[in-house]
Image (cartoon, grey):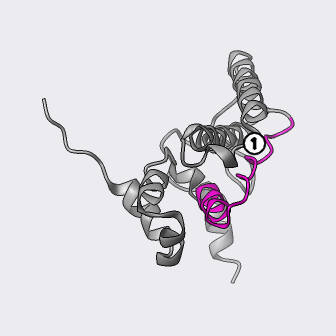
Amino acid sequence: MIKTADLEVPIELASMLQPEEEATLGLSAALKLVYAPARPDSHAYWRWCARALVKGDHLPPPPEPPRQIASSADLIHAEQVIACSDLYLWLARTPEFRASGLCYEEVHRDRYALTERIDQALLSRLDTRKRCTSCGCILPLYHRYRLCENCYLDRSYDY
């Protein structure tokens, strides 16, 4: 069975590369870079890595994880760190960029440890329900906004 490839992410990443950066990297390396496994929450980190590769620098380390995973916000932050770590590890294993990934072992070890921490937080039944950013009340499961209706109404009459 033949299935068409989803090119949305590579096209978005390619649009983030400047023509002179692509020329510096070379077409082959630039193509590898835009096919890196970047999720939407790691695109800023991908750009940071791309700049480092263009300059011939070492890959920047992934962001620091939260000290503890005690809320859904901590969990989201930890998952973003995992996404950035996956990107770092993929780039550091790619032959064109291997020389720039000096911290491969450290990032690999830290990613594994963070995964263990996430598992422990989920096993301890971490409350991952979405909450209003203003008052902290629990929002309905499919609520689209960051504020509850009461906080939204209070805020809209403050002008």
Quadrant of the image occupied by residue 131: top right
Quadrant of the image occupied by residue 148: bottom right
Q: In this view, does 159 lie above or below 121?
A: below
Q: In this view, does 34 lie above or below 99?
A: below
Quadrant of the image occupied by residue 4: top left
Quadrant including the N terminus: top left
Q: Does the segment drawn in magenta span residue 55?
A: yes
Residue under the image location 54 percent in, 70 percent down: 24
Which residue reaches farthest bottom? 159
Q: Does the segment drawn in magenta span residue 15?
A: no
Which residue reaches farthest top? 123
Residue under the image location 59 percent in, 48 percent down: 97
Magenta-highlighted residues: 44-67
Q: Do we see residue 147 in this rendering?
A: no
Q: Do we see residue 55 in this rendering?
A: yes
**Of residues 119 and 37, the one drawn nearer to the viewer in this rendering:** 37
Label 1: few (<14), some (14–19) or many (≥20) C-alpha neighbours in 10 Å: some
**Of residues 93 and 99, the one drawn nearer to the viewer in this rendering:** 99
Which residue reaches farthest left? 1
Q: Is residue 86 above or below residue 58?
A: above
Quadrant including the C terminus: bottom right
- Residue 133: % across, % down: 71, 54
Name the secondary structure under disc 1: loop
Q: Which amino acid does label 1 sit on?
A: Leu
Q: Is residue 26 left or right of residue 104?
A: left
Residue under the image location 60 percent in, 41 percent down: 83
- Residue 146: % across, % down: 61, 55
Q: Mark 1 points at which residue?
A: 102
- Residue 69: % across, % down: 78, 32
Residue under the image location 35 percent in, 56 percent down: 8
Q: Is residue 158 above or below residue 82?
A: below
- Residue 3: % across, % down: 18, 38
